[in-house]
Amino acid sequence: MKRSLVASLVAVVLALTAHAALAETKVRVGWCAKTVSSAAAPFAIAMKMGWYKAAGLDVELVPLAGSSACTQAVATKEVPFALPSVEPLAIAIRQGVKAKIYYTAYQGNIYGIAVPAESPVQKIADLKGKTIGVISMGSAGVPVAKALVATAGLNPDSDVTIVVAGEGAQTAAMVRSKQVDALSQFDTQYAMVENAGVKLRLLDTKEIDRYPANGLLALDDTLKSRRADAVAVAKGYAMGTVFAIANPEAAVKILYEVFPQTKPTGKDEATAIRDDVKVLGARIVNWKLEKAGVKRWGENSEGNYAAYADFMQKYGIIKDKVAAKDLITNDLIGDINRFDAAKVAAEAKGFK
């Protein structure tokens, strides 16, 4: 009798466990770089703190070759959500893709052209005849480099050469060996290159500083059919962002725990954490709402997107005009912001 009771209880527990597992929806989110880096801290924090689990999600980051690859993966439904920059979306819209950025993650532009600190190149016009390294040919660094070169009156197809320089230490090695003269990458990558011992200097790109960079992207149909999932993915990311800003060191430690492959090798832990806090600091500047003058996490500034669309058309990233309303939607922002940011920040500061 007792054995029967115990067996019944075990069966109930197993059934409940199986039901809980089934209750979590697997969600694949495109990460627009070949490797997960410290910039993924908001996702790691949301996973560690159980915020995604509480929302019934099991989130998986899927590394892809760049923003173009991410946008294509969303368009072909390989992933329902991704975190690309806006340029490939503007191109895809003219190809009939109906998708929108529903949460701006980086309110300020994370891209720009950097050169070694000792380089004789002082301005973008000096790049004539030079080689520019990007993470991949599918990275937004490619169209951004071409547009910035065009602003200086150069022909991006003949006056410069764009090549793949990889990421982090690989990029640093390319710069050190003078295989590239400049880089068209982004804030956290530049911090990683400097951590690898190569000092960089950003060229003046004030014209694009106020333009938005990456945001959570989904097909229009997905935003309708999977609205709750879209909100939960973005809300967890937003809460993770607040946490990371409040306690960058804790964010890095959580990142190492959730994504062990992000922990650098060949360094003691204190040095690794210090270096990655520096990398995270480069991104925090562009996470902050003040950069775009918005009030809510993820809010898409229609004015900034419209200005960037004009810039993209003017300098050849896109051929036809794209309206901001075709790129973005703020329809989910109210639901995404249904959390206590002050409470999350306090929890971060007290995290052990």
Image (tube, helix red, strand yellow):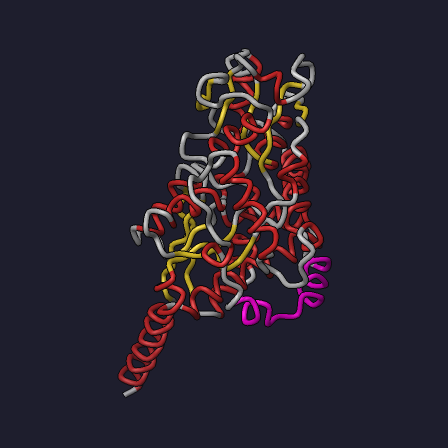
Where does the C terminus fall, quadrant-wise? bottom right
Q: State the image quarter where residue 337 is shown.
A: bottom right
Image mark count: 0
Please tell me whether residue 80 is drawn above or below residue 33 in the rendered image. Answer: below
> Magenta stretch containing residue 345, yes or no?
yes
Along the line of sight, the residue nearer the viewer: 320 or 148: 320
Q: In the image, what residue occupies the spot 64% across and 18% down?
A: 116
Q: In the image, what residue occupies the spot 38% across and 50% down?
A: 93
Q: Position of residue 275 (x, y in %)?
A: 65, 34
Q: In the image, what residue occupies the spot 59% across and 60% down?
A: 299
Please tell me whether residue 205 is drawn above or below residue 94 in the rendered image. Answer: above
Q: Mostly what secondary structure, the magenta segment?
A: helix
Q: State the image quarter where residue 241 is shown.
A: bottom right
Where does the N terminus fall, quadrant-wise? bottom left
Along the line of sight, the residue nearer the viewer: 196 or 117: 117
Along the line of sight, the residue nearer the viewer: 1 or 315: 315
Which range of residues does the magenta coloring cover?
A: 332-350
Q: Position of residue 293 (x, y in %)?
A: 69, 55
Q: Position of residue 47 (x, y in %)?
A: 51, 58
Please tell me whether residue 140 is drawn above or below residue 171 in the rendered image. Answer: below
Instruction: Residue 50: tell me if it is visible.
Output: no
> Magenta stretch containing residue 75, yes or no?
no
Residue 206 as seen in the image, left or right of residue 44: right
Q: In the image, what residue occupies the spot 54% across and 38% down?
A: 263
Q: Position of residue 63 (x, y in %)?
A: 41, 42
Residue 337 as seen in the image, left or right of residue 25: right
Instruction: Residue 208: tell me if it is visible.
Output: yes
